[in-house]
Image (cartoon, rainbow, N blue to C red):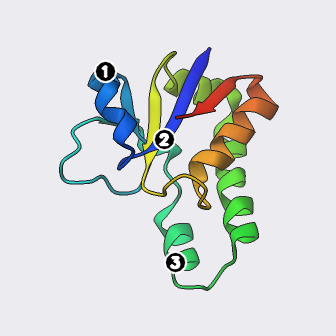
Amino acid sequence: MKIYTSYYANPILKTVSQDTLRAISVGLPKEMTCTKIKELAPDWATVSAYKDGKIDWNEYTRQYTAKLDALGVTKISGLLENGCVYLCFEGKGKNCHRHILADWLSEHASMDVQEL
């Protein structure tokens, strides 16, 4: 299975079929109408604590990874679709849960995940 990750403001998304876009963030930009996979979004408490400086990136990663571990490979694999692009807000090169998800999928499900 080949899946992709990216961020909502990435200009390359204009060249991608809109039917392949999937949101995995807590919120969604007003202009986006793509399918939302809420199970893969981080918990709002984790996002809020990180944004407020109450936890660091390592703790954010630990909490989100624990969520993925609790869901498990079978459940997460069932939420993913071949060729789809899983999106959130953070731009390329920034700390973001989609990178944690990509690493988790590579390690636990032997999936090839590419950042657009």
Q: Secondary structure at mark 2?
A: strand
Of tags 3 and 1, which is closer to the observer? 1
Q: 50 left or right of 59?
A: left
Is 49 located above or below residue 41 in the figure? below
Residue 81 in the image, given as x and y percentages of width and height: 49, 19
Query: Residue 73 at what x, y percent from top left?
Result: 69, 29
Return the disc, 2 or 3, that comes first in the chain's sequence: 2
Q: Amino acid at mark 2?
A: Ser
Report which quarter residue 85 is drawn in.
top left
Q: Earlier in the sequence, mark 1 or mark 2?
A: 2
Residue to which mark 2 is pinned: 6
How many residues crowd around disc 3 within 10 Å: few (fewer than 14), some, or many (20 or more)?
few
User: x, y (%) of residue 19?
Assistant: 29, 22
Picture quarter with the N terminus: top right
Q: CA distance from mark 1 to mark 2?
A: 14 Å
Q: Residue at x 47, y 36 (%)?
A: 86
Towards the viewer: 4 or 111? 4
Percent position (x, y) of residue 40? Answer: 52, 43
Q: Which residue is mark 1?
A: 17
Identify residue type, mark 3: Lys
N-term-proximal mark, 3 vs 1: 1
Determine whether, in the image, residue 36 is placed left or right of residue 57. Answer: left
Pick whichever, 12 or 64, lies toward us. 12
Q: Residue at x 52, y 25 (%)?
A: 80
Q: Residue at x 69, y 70 (%)?
A: 57
User: Quick one: which residue is furthest to the left in this view?
Assistant: 31
Residue at mark 3: 51
